[in-house]
Image: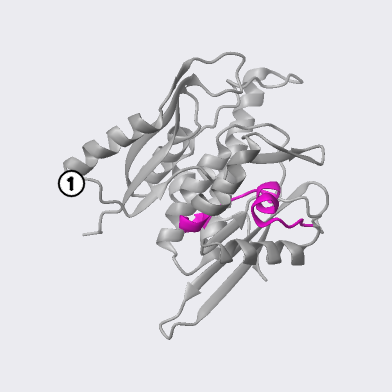
């Protein structure tokens, strides 16, 4: 009998669409994990729509929920998933911009990252956390070493500005994982992935990526290459299905709406469960 693996997922939640816990819970369950979800935010829909309504959980309310689990002695978890992935900012037209207050940066650096096992920043967030800029693959690897030194054993820079040899239609992601051998030495595996860009704006992809990377690194604990290939390939299938359905609904030549671009998660169950590998990772 397979050992039960439990995840406490503390993220936002929407009634309509797939972001936060809505994006993370289904793939984790499909991949065999028991998920207890705490909704830090509960909105009618994600903020990519024109309007939204809902509530934000404050710290006292969060503690109250956790105390209830603790009192019943059901607070034993293998993993805690919270998309401090870290969600801090991104680049638009080459310019970086934070979408959280700047005074939170020291909190991420000094409190959040040191206790994380896995972090999945984009290039801008990796630069903010490390205090270093990335202009080349070598500099990206050095930044991931800095992030390792802060605590996490697995670092994946999910998107970068680095140029792909395949052309401008491809996006480069980089990963680094430290593992400890029985004799106490540390081995670092580094990988690069080149993914075809999709001409659409999706919401919830970071949450889906973090959940699947957690699942596949659990199943392949010492093989970042395989874990990332399965994660990114599953992402590819979900996004291709989503854009195809969205364009069909929008009509020829028309731009899909946020509602039409909601991730086709349930329809992609088989691809999440057993993804055909369409993105190969290169070991550096």
- The location of residue 102, given as percent across then percent down, is 65, 39
Name the residue tied to disc 1: 73
- Residue drawn at (66%, 48%) of the image: 125
Colour pattern of the rendering: one colour
- The location of residue 186, given as percent across then percent down, is 51, 78
Does 192 sit left or right of 214 as displayed?
right
| Kind of element beneath mark 1 | loop
Q: What is the magenta range?
A: 113-134
- Residue drawn at (44%, 64%) of the image: 220
Note whether 279 is above or below 18 in the view shown. Answer: below
Name the image quarter holding the N terminus: bottom left
In which quadrant of the rendered view does residue 191 lie?
bottom right
Task: Decide whether residue 126 is among the magenta residues.
Answer: yes
State the residue lying farthest toward the left: 72
Q: Is residue 155 visible from the viewing direction of this image?
A: yes
In which quadrant of the rendered view does residue 34 lie?
top left
- The location of residue 90, given as percent across then percent down, is 69, 40
Note whether 168 is above or below 177 in the view shown. Answer: above
């Amino acid at each position: 009998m397979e050992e039960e693996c439990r995840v406490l997922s503390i993220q936002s939640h929407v009634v309509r669409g797939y972001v936060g816990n809505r994006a993370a819970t289904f793939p984790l369950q499909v991949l065999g994990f028991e998920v207890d979800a705490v909704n830090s935010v509960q909105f009618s829909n994600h903020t990519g729509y024109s309007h939204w309504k809902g509530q934000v959980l404050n710290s006292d309310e969060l503690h109250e929920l956790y105390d209830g689990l603790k009192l019943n002695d059901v607070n034993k978890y293998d993993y805690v998933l919270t998309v401090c992935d870290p969600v801090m900012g991104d680049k638009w037209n080459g310019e970086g911009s934070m979408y959280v207050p700047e005074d939170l940066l020291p909190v991420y650096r000094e409190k959040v990252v040191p206790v994380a096992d896995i972090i999945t920043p984009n290039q801008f967030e990796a630069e903010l956390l490390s205090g270093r800029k990335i202009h080349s693959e070598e500099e990206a690897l050095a930044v991931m070493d800095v992030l390792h030194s802060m605590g996490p054993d697995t670092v994946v820079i999910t998107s970068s500005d680095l140029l792909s040899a395949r052309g401008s239609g491809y996006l480069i992601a980089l990963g680094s994982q430290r593992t400890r051998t029985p004799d106490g030495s540390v081995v670092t595996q580094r990988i690069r992935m080149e993914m075809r860009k999709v001409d659409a704006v999706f919401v919830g992809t970071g949450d889906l990526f973090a959940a699947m990377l957690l699942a596949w690194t659990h199943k392949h604990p010492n093989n970042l290459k395989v874990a990332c290939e399965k994660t990114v390939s599953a992402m590819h299938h979900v996004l291709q299905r989503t854009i195809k359905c969205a364009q069909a609904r929008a009509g020829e030549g028309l731009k899909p709406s946020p509602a039409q671009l909601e991730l086709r998660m349930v329809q992609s169950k088989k691809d999440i469960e057993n993804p055909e590998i369409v993105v190969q990772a290169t070991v550096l």
